[in-house]
Amino acid sequence: MSNKLIDLIDISKSYGMQTVLDELNLYIRENEFLTLLGPSGCGKTTTLRILGGFEMPDKGRVIFDGQDITDLPPNKRQLNTVFQKYALFTHMNIAENIAFGLKIKNKSKQYIHDKIKYALKLVNLDGFENRMPDSLSGGQQQRIAIARAIVNEPKVLLLDEPLGALDLKMRQDMQYELIRLKNELGITFLYVTHDQEEALTMSDTIVVMNQGYIQQIGTPEKIYNEPENAFVADFIGESNIISATMVQDRLVKILGVNFPCVDEGFGQNKPVDVVIRPEDIDLLKPGEGSIDGVVTHLIFKGVHYEMEVMANNYEWLVHSTDMFPVGTEVSIHVDPFDIQIMKKPESEDEEAVNIEE
Amino acid sequence: MKNKRLLAGPYLFWSASFVVIPLLVIVYYAFTSDEGTFTFSNLAQITTPENLKALGMSILLSFLSTAICLILAYPLAMILSQNKVSQTSFIVLIFILPMWMNFLLRTLAWQTLLEKNGVINSVLSFLHLSALEIINTPYAIILGMVYNFLPFMVLPIYNVLIKIDSNVINAARDLGANPVQTFCKVIFPLSIPGVISGITMVFVPALTTFVISDLLGGGKILLIGNVIEQSFKQNSNWHVGSGLSLVLMVFIIASMALVAKYDNEDGGATF
């Protein structure tokens, strides 16, 4: 992909005693769908608000398209925001809402009229010009909020948990809608969410954040399959995170049993964390796999069965399309490339990545 | 359902005995003469030059007071709504505190302050400044009205302003509006229900007051409230007093309808 469009350099921000962002460095490329993902209080919304100009960083610079915009007020920035609860102007109808930014820029009547038409078509709400925001459903209001932002032709659209207030079905529809919009508009999307599924579905790049620190930056596949630490592994999807020892390159001892794996360079007999995704565990007949155990829980989840297998004093979470009734004796098998090895946190900074339980 | 309706009973009894019936009595007095015959002459009393002048003066003074209250209250309400809670409650307290004192007492205090040899003029003469001579003038009445009714303007506006989602204001800024444009196009229009409610709560008592004009106008300036009071108490003519009250009521309803008309689009008239 192309050049850096936004560059956040050493951004720090605290409220009173509480540090929200600590020397955050992040760049966003042109035409990228980048998602800031993390639990509440991880600093993702603050990052977005600093970009939008609603918060001032205590320290650090915000570079946009080669220019330092750190001190510019929001109305002077070439980016637009879609807010969490839509933030539509309830005293104006839909057309007036969408026209707001254009009227301020003194665009011609004809131009504004055409733009409103175009934007409503883009969000599939043709003919809604004269409706009032209150008469629209949550999903429709969110589309209007998007339309209101994009008519200004921003280079970057900031989206602050825009689907948070919608129900599940609507949320899924809007995810596809947003991907389509981004492809049609060809602009950069910066998306903030705590919903890992949303992030995995839509993003080109995911930035996982926790307690003001970036934990991992990568494509959805990379984040899911190769989490860099226990926090990322735990936050993105369900997983078995187990303390283990790296015996040597390509061999890890999990719960007293040696498993072949594909990772190298951790040293010999070093403590590590391993992540094994529940869908990567195969259940075999007793004796055929690496560790024998007994199925203790069984839940039907639709696409798969979710089972818990007690083996070597650890409850393994297993997803499988095959059903094993509670009490069945099974054996656990994991392919070497399905075992993800992670360094254990050592320094205090890294402690921040510890999973809060 | 039926049981719940019974709960409204005490209020219905109250409003019937102390609101509806007295109103009907006023209407009865307004349309009858001393001899008990039907007449419009009580209502027509409003057209005498003195009474017209009193009504005109009332409307002028209460209009000015309402305008001054609005100009003073709006910025204050805005500052209050933007501040953090701890500071806000202190400022609100300062504003509410005078309301905890008796209305008459407050107005009497102003009389003492403004008198020819009152506190303010003593201080001014001590500083060798020219004396302030506004007691017994319309200015003193406006001052009294603004002082007494200002909180009733601040609170409804404040209540509306704190309910505006800060992201709506952020959205306006985000879409390119500078602070002034944001205020004119978003904050003020959204606060109109509070403004209307504030105007009502200041204009109506200001239009009907007779205490403030009595104490600060020194009996020289007659407002319509004073005329009505005199007809009841000094002239003991309940018929004329009722007639004038009725006319005043029509004026209030008309002016409120006029104000509400501007609020129609939002459908949020708050009185």
Image (cartoon, rainbow, N blue to C red):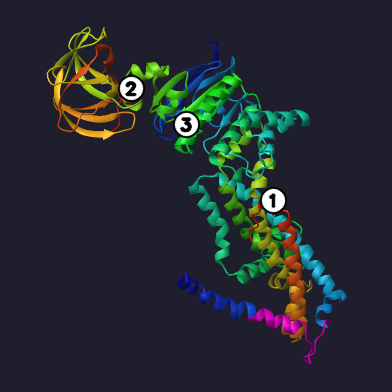
Q: Which mark is residue A349?
A: 2
Residue in the foreground of this view, choosing between A165 and B207: A165
Q: Position of residue B153 (x, y in %)?
A: 64, 57
Q: Position of residue B187 (x, y in %)?
A: 64, 44
Label 1 to label 3, Cα distance in Å?
35 Å
Q: Which residue is mark 1?
A: B265
Left or right of residue A346, residue B2 in this image: right
Q: Residue at x 63, y 58 (%)?
A: B270
The tag earlier along the polypeptide, 2 or 3, is 3
Q: Which residue is mark 3?
A: A172
Q: Which residues are magenta?
A: B21-40
Mark 2 lies on a secondary structure that is helix
Badge 2: chain ID: A
The reply to whether residue A336 is in sight is yes
- Amino acid under disc 3: Gln
**Number of residues whose C-alpha sits closer than 10 Å to that of mark 2, classed few (under 14), some (14–19) or many (20 or more):** few
Q: Which mark is residue A208?
A: none
Q: How many marks?
A: 3
Tag 1 and tag 2, C-beta contact below 8 Å: no
- Amino acid under disc 1: Glu
Mark 1 lies on a secondary structure that is helix
